[in-house]
Amino acid sequence: MTQPNTLTIAQARDALRKGELTAVELTEACLKAIDAADALNAFVHKTPELALERARAADARLAAGAAPSMCGIPVGIKDLFCTEGVASQAASHILNGFRPEYESTVSAQLRDAGAVMLGKLNMDEFAMGSSNETSTYGDAVNPWKVDDRRLTPGGSSGGSAAAVAADLCLGATGTDTGGSIRQPAAFTGTVGIKPTYGRCSRWGIVAFASSLDQAGPMTRTVRDAAIMLEAMCGHDPMDSTSADLPVPDFEAALGAGVKGRKIGIPREYRMEGMPSEIEKLWADGADMLRDAGAEIVDISLPHTKYALPTYYVIAPAEASSNLARYDGVRYGHRAKLAQGDGITEMYEKTRAEGFGPEVQRRVMIGTYVLSAGFYDAYYNRARKVRTLIKRDFDTVFADGVDAILTPATPSAAFGLGEMVDADPVQMYLNDVFTVTVNLAGLPGIAVPAGLDRQGLPLGLQLIGRPWDEAGLLNTAQVLEEAAGFVSKPAKWW
Amino acid sequence: MLDLSFESPKPKVIAGATGDWELVIGMEIHAQVASRAKLFSGASTQFGAEPNSNVSFVDAAMPGMLPVVNEFCIEQAVRTGLGLKAQINLVSAFDRKNYFYPDLPQGYQISQLYHPLVGEGEVIVDMGAGVGRRVRIERIHVEQDAGKSIHDMDPTMSFVDLNRTGVALMEIVSRPDIRGPEEAAAYVTKLRQILRYLGTCDGNMQNGNLRADVNVSVCRPGDYERYQETQDFGHLGTRCEIKNMNSMRFIQAAIEYEARRQIAILEDGGAVVQETRLFDPDKGETRSMRSKEEAHDYRYFPCPDLLPLEIEQDWVDGIAASLPELPDAKKARFMGDFGLTDYDASVLTADVANAAYFEAVAAEAGDGKLAANWVINELFGRLKKEGHDITDSPVSAGQLAGIIKLIRAGDISGKIAKDLFEIVYTEGGDPAAIVEDRGMKQVTDTGAIEQAVDEIIAANPAQVEKAKANPKLAGWFVGQVMKATGGKANPKAVNEIVTARLGL
């Protein structure tokens, strides 16, 4: 039999239900794989005892029958999610030793559906980064490799992507503020969906930029994403921005095909200097959907070029305020103070020691754009542009477009450390195809669609109408099947 | 129709070395919303609890926590707005005011800068019979209170109590329409009265549930009128804001001091610096808050955790329909229905519980004026003497009405009624039964009174002569008869019989 940890969620679910496999066996296989994968630095807090306890409970539930799809499925949880009694640090030194007394709504829903948490996953500090290099735990490493070059799994959900790609777990939670699910998914040959803003509760997830943050699943197949998303989302009265809408049966919506569906190709996403491989991948993706019966149309999203600067005003602005609570007063790291130091010194030293350089940079940018005299020029203007970006999408959808196809990233995974000396804006360019989706609050999914000439995975992104995750997943599965992406990283760790 | 017309009072004038000065005052009142739970969390708002016992994960700003607005607090603020005849904004929004302080766990206060819940309204401040100041309300917004920092418990450490963190406040902002220290105190008094009528704030200033920031400036006579005509603040002086006062006395003293301080600066040829000041009650002066404390850039921006607050007109209408009668209307009705004086009506309506008590007495006793006299002169006097208030009065409205009914029926005299009141106050019991049991009923049997009068006339021939010469001395006979009957004789009957018998 195949290694249980390499199964998809759907396969494992069926095997569990048939009694061909137990949740304990499956969990043990994952725990073994995790222990053998320290070189990837994906799991930063392992919870084997808790996992086995939950696996045993899942087996009892499965034996009783009528268990939910996620029952007994081992998953990893991004460190940004607060998990009761388990370290939850947002990969930051400032939350050193923090163990919440509460469980985030999303991870609680997974737990209640019977999913087995294996531990916490690496990420960029406070989800700020595109390479998982800003983590207090050190870099997560992509299981995909070219020669001896260690590659980034992307960020900020780098640990989640690496863990899923390396078969350490069957699925993982991610969060996406500007592309943090989709870019790592694309870099690791996995599937990642950022649902519509408001689909998943943000309660208990450490906030980065509240108006942009959304949780979503990272899995090996589109079907798995559908199954896991359904368990994660739904209305939560504890989150005022969570939508009070019914959750559709996403898995049941798969297989409907794309005949007659209109897929838009936005001309503004054809960037200057785009690698020909990416351009070809995109064209191939359009051909695949056309061959499957979709109508491919050229569309315009005229304000696209303003998306990145808009994002890098709004996200840091919100972050600068959201991160004010990490002050050393109540929990987490507090700096040692010198004789005569007062509260101001405590704040300054604690935050200087506790936050890494990228977080400090964004807090400073955010503080600057909100400050008196600059508010209108930056923050208010960014809000207005955000409205225009959203309107671009509204117009296209009103014209009958069902989904939009774009590349997921401007390149394949790059080498860890290779961007260290680059201008931070170079790193921010990783988000160029993904941030618009967050600014407009839309659902977006990254699907592996091919390999570049070095043999590294490349992904395509599909953007859907608000609340149409079901349609989006259906289209994504058509693309997934047509692309026939089956490659796995060669195990080197 | 209620007659609520009034004249405006004269502004306070301070004579300076270079001429007269007038005061211009605007106030921001922070009123704690009467609600059992906080504005954005389910934690209790109970005063005086163990430090840090009323603190939820949201209040402590634990990672990943989110605010959810407490609908009841919004309802209370809307009710307050309606009570101040103010515009209710069906769409408002919450903003974050960012600053660092240990008693502000989030690092920001959630408030409403750009789109407040309540817009323009007004308060009529009573300044004596027929005299009132119309103070315009600019806005009321809803916001979170901060916690409490305690710096004086330990030489090296500070302590933080988060019980108050996140409690809902209404910030009620007035226009600069207040013209003197007494008016300022009267404004707070009136606002407090209305809030207590509405049940939206308990008005307890000692506990800090009602605090005032006062903006004071001075100008020359005529400048204010020019401001009124143009609404151009350029006609007014530079203002200073005196923060966080929780006593009427301090408010008046602070304004008085601050006005004189500003006048002294101006008359010396100096300029008033716009700044925030604190009142020191021990020294009776205001002093500048260190610039470091106020050099805040609050970086306000819309709170991304909360959607804009949208309320329905129907909901607002429902609240409007449930508003209680407010002080001005109640006072006018007391004057109209019961024939009370302006003063008595003001006293009785000052507090909603007093007014309710009075109305219950008046309704049962059937005589509003008599009820007012007894409530104000006998009951209030006695309660005050013993440190009680109406809520713990030993004499119920029913008992006091019982006493008044006995007077009206002629069963007891006014003097006996006072004795009876004393008995009811100290011992309790049904007034009618007490009168019966203790033989306090006054004698109206004319035969018995005639007999007593005849006996006294017969025994005092010299007095009879004097009285015949000077009819004013007939009172002596009345007194003697009352004495002889133990005060129980009906004084009116005695008077008539004495007059007749003496042939006056």
Image (cartoon, grey):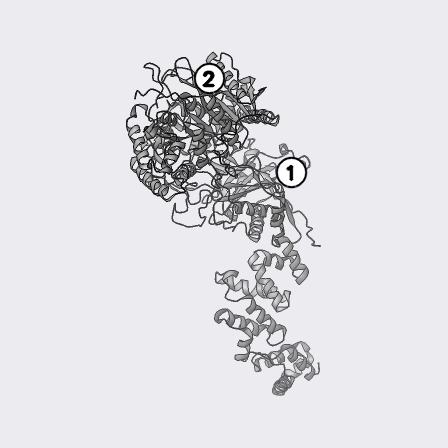
Up the image or down, B99 lies above or below A374; here it is below
Q: Which residue is mark 1?
A: B224
Question: Can I make out residue A196 in this image?
Answer: no
Side of B105 relative to B133 (left or right): left
Q: Find the distance from the CA under tag 2 to the CA under tag 1.
A: 65 Å
Q: Position of residue A73 (x, y in %)?
A: 37, 35
Q: Nearer the viewer, residue A7 or B336?
A: A7
Q: Nearer the viewer, residue B378 or A303?
A: A303
Q: Position of residue A143 (x, y in %)?
A: 35, 21
Mark 2, other Cα within 10 Å: few <14 / some 14–19 / many ≥20: many
The answer to whether the residue labelled 2 contacts the one labelled 1, judged by CB atoms less than 8 Å apart, is no
Q: Nearer the viewer, residue A82 or A36?
A: A36
Side of A460 relative to A488 (left or right): right
What is the number of the mark on residue A410? 2
Q: Position of residue A261 (x, y in %)?
A: 57, 25
User: The disc labelled 2 sits on which kind of residue?
Assistant: Pro
Side of B198 relative to A136 (left or right): right
